[in-house]
Image (spheres, helix red, strand yellow):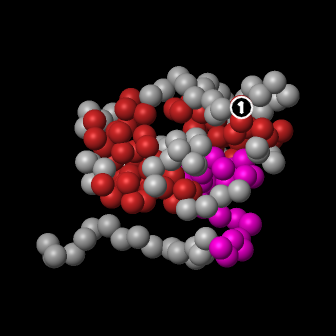
Amino acid sequence: HPAKSGIKVIDFGSSCFEHEKVYTYIQSRFYRSPEVILGMNYHTAIDMWSLGCILAELYTGYPIFPGENEQEQLSCIMEVLGLPDKDLINRSSRKRLFFDSTGAPRPVVNSKGRRRRPATKTLAGVLKCDDELFVDFVSKCLVWDPERRLKPQPALRHPFI
């Protein structure tokens, strides 16, 4: 039926109000924000990260960051976005799981023997997309630092939307 949307947003089982953070498990792995992976404080910016991941997947048909576990998840993110700032790493309560004492990422090899390397892919290349507004919108959702990530109100005013 033309009046019905083909996309449905579902599964709000772990959702909570910003002042009621009650879950230790939050966000499905493929859509999990860096601050959650790194054990940092989080807020609504995690939802903008997830939105960027979902839009990328809707466009390509595949998860943009298909990590087999949290270590590889962060490696997938670094492969496209490069390394996070040292300040972000230093604020992480779980940094030793992902980075060595110099701040270099710990090597991660997945079940297929693949090792991902930071900054070896571009977002536009991964998306295989030449729509500059779409790539710009997704890139502003997928920013390491949650304080610099696109916020909901400015997102609504973005030319892509």
> What's the magenta bit mostly, secondary-structure-wise?
loop
Q: In the image, which residues are magenta? A: 19-40
Disc 1 is placed on an element classified as helix
Q: Judge whether 100 appears above or below 53 on screen.
A: above
Residue at image x 21%, y 75%? 4
Q: Judge whether 136 appears above or below 105 on screen.
A: below
Residue 131: image location, x then y, percent: 25, 38
Q: Judge whether 67 appears above or below 123 on screen.
A: below
Q: In this orientation, which residue lies closer to the viewer: 18 or 62?
A: 18
**32 relative position to 158: left or right:** right
Q: Which of the 4 quarters of the picture holds residue 123?
A: top left
Read off the residue under disc 1.
86
Q: In this orientation, which residue lies closer to the viewer: 110 or 14?
A: 14
Which quarter shows the C terminus?
bottom left
Q: Amino acid at mark 1?
A: Lys
Which quarter shows the N terminus?
bottom left
**153 relative position to 44: left or right:** left
Residue at image x 83%, y 39%? 96
Q: Residue 135 lies in magenta, yes or no? A: no
Q: In this orientation, which residue lies closer to the viewer: 153 or 121?
A: 153
**139 relative position to 66: left or right:** left
Q: In this orientation, which residue lies closer to the viewer: 19 or 22?
A: 19
Residue 57: image location, x then y, percent: 41, 50
Residue 18: image location, x then y, percent: 61, 71
Say if residue 23 shows up in the picture.
Answer: yes
Q: Judge whether 139 appears above or below 51 on screen.
A: above
Residue at image x 76%, y 43%? 91
